[in-house]
Amino acid sequence: MAISFLDKTDLKILQVLQDNGRLSNVELSERVALSPSPCLRRLKQLEESGIIRRYAALLDPCNIALGLQAFIRVRVNKSKQSRDEFTLAVQHWPQVLNCFALTGETDYILQAFFSDMNAFSYFVLETLLATPGVEDARSSFVLKEIKATTSLPLEHLDINQ
């Protein structure tokens, strides 16, 4: 299913599921004003097309003793080998939830969670800086979460159908 085939009902399904991915098909069909069979068929198409990547439970880090959130800016040696090694290594670091390659002075930014400053320090000194090719790491800690969402905007897809 390509984006050009999405209609208002598909967009409504996507918005409702972004708010609550645990709805049953019956609940979902009621919220989007569609009977259950066509709703399930559309949902399967959205999943098979890759528009819906996966479903997940979002945990509260503070409630599982991961109250220290850090954004770590990493500079890596410019060689392809160093970039490849870093990209492979970061896949195995459970503390890192997100890693993005960037333009500008920083090559990568990591979003990571830790139980405390000792856990953070150990990760930086024994894991991150020990990774071949890593030249520098600078960190910022989250003082307060102002906005956090997993919902992507869909307004630009509203094709007035």
Image (tube, rainbow, N blue to C red):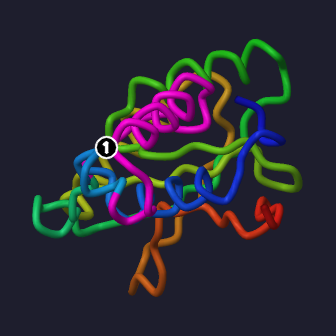
Which quadrant of the structure image shows residue 79? Answer: top right
Region in magenta: 30-57
Left or right placement of residue 123 versus residue 151 in this view: left
Q: Residue at x 66, y 45 (%)?
A: 100
Q: Residue furthest front?
A: 35
Q: Nearer the viewer, residue 160 or 2?
A: 160
Q: In the rendered structure, which amino acid carries the disc numbered 1?
A: Ala
Label 1: how many residues lie within 10 Å, few (<14), some (14-19) or many (20+)?
Answer: few
Q: Residue at x 54, y 50 (%)?
A: 110
Element type where label 1 sits in the image: loop
Q: Residue at x 47, y 69 (%)?
A: 149
| Residue linked to disc 1 | 56
Q: Is residue 42 above or below residue 154?
A: above
Q: Is residue 138 above or below residue 49?
A: below
Which quadrant of the structure image shows residue 36? Answer: top left
For residue 54: magenta? Answer: yes
Q: Residue furthest top?
A: 81
For residue 65: magenta? Answer: no
Q: Position of residue 45 (x, y in %)?
A: 55, 29
Q: Nearer the viewer, residue 52 or 149?
A: 52
Left or right placement of residue 72 versus residue 158 in this view: left
Q: Position of residue 131 (x, y in %)?
A: 53, 26
Q: Quadrant of the C terminus?
A: bottom right
Q: Quadrant of the N terminus?
A: top right
Q: Position of residue 143 (x, y in %)?
A: 40, 84
Q: Residue at x 77, y 52 (%)?
A: 106
Q: Position of residue 96 (x, y in %)?
A: 42, 43
Which quadrant of the structure image shows residue 34? Answer: bottom left
Q: Is residue 83 above or below residue 146?
A: above
